[in-house]
Image (cartoon, helix red, strand yellow):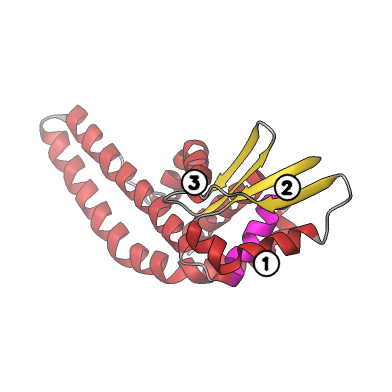
Amino acid sequence: MPGIDRIYDKIIADAEERAGLRLSETSSKIQSMKSVVDERIEEYRKVKISETEKEAKGIVSRAQANRRLEGKKQLLAVKQEMVTEVFEKTQQALINLSNAEKLTLYTKLIGNCLKEGHNEVSLNGKDKKAFGDKLIQNIGSALGPDISVALSGQDIPDDFGVIVKNGKIYSNSTFSSMLKYMKQNIEADVMKILFKRGVEV
């Protein structure tokens, strides 16, 4: 469905922009992530959007007969709830990536945050144990003599993704941080896509 593809493209494009990568360099990663998200989004599209659109239309119909302003507020709440669900499902899909997929994604995220000098990379305990050493090995093999990288002794609590520290500079690429940033910037676009068949208020 074109609308759902546009959600994918927007979310992934903004994630890669946050990491400073070009879309053409990550087309294989996009396809990998889309295959993980597809099943959940398809189910969501068939069930949740249909139910919510019907509910929204019912709200508008009742609001037109009495309190139009209240109807608008309720409809907006429904839309915002759906947008929130889209981002929550996206975050869950990212969390459920395989270790190999996370390793590829983290390598790209870290690569664009490294600065001259010593860089410390923080992961959560699970990812650190699973592939932390391999991640540092992959990154270190491509570095010049002015840049070094090592795992931090401080793990990321209750989140996935990476944090890169260079001196007093922190680059936060945790999933929750990236999705929060994207939600602020593309929430209106996502809402338009979800409700393109829309409900006139």
Q: For the point 67% across and 46% down, which residue is it?
A: 120
Which segment is the magenta one? 100-114
Q: Which residue is mark 1?
A: 134
Left or right of 40 in this view: 184: right
Residue 88 locus on image (x, y percent):
39, 53
Left or right of 56 in this view: 122: right
Quarter of the image where the C terminus is located: top left
Q: Which residue is mark 2?
A: 112
**Three-letter code, disc 3:** Leu
Q: Is residue 87 visible?
A: yes
Q: For the point 41% across and 51% down, which residue is it?
A: 158
Earlier along the polypeptide chain: callout 2 or callout 1? 2
Q: CA distance from mark 3 to mark 1?
A: 26 Å
Earlier along the polypeptide chain: callout 2 or callout 3? 2
Q: Is residue 38 above or below residue 153?
A: below
Q: Is residue 113 visible?
A: no
> Is disc 1 placed on a helix, strand or loop?
helix
Question: Badge 2 local density, few (<14 within 10 Å), some, or many (20+)?
Answer: some
Left or right of 151 in this view: 25: right
Question: Badge 3 local density, few (<14 within 10 Å), some, or many (20+)?
Answer: some
Q: CA distance from mark 2 to mark 1?
A: 18 Å
Question: Between tags 2 and 1, which lies in front?
Answer: 1
Q: Which residue is mark 3?
A: 179
Q: For the point 22% across and 54% down, which residue is it?
A: 54
Q: Residue placed farthest to the front in the image?
A: 153
Labelled disc at residue 91: none
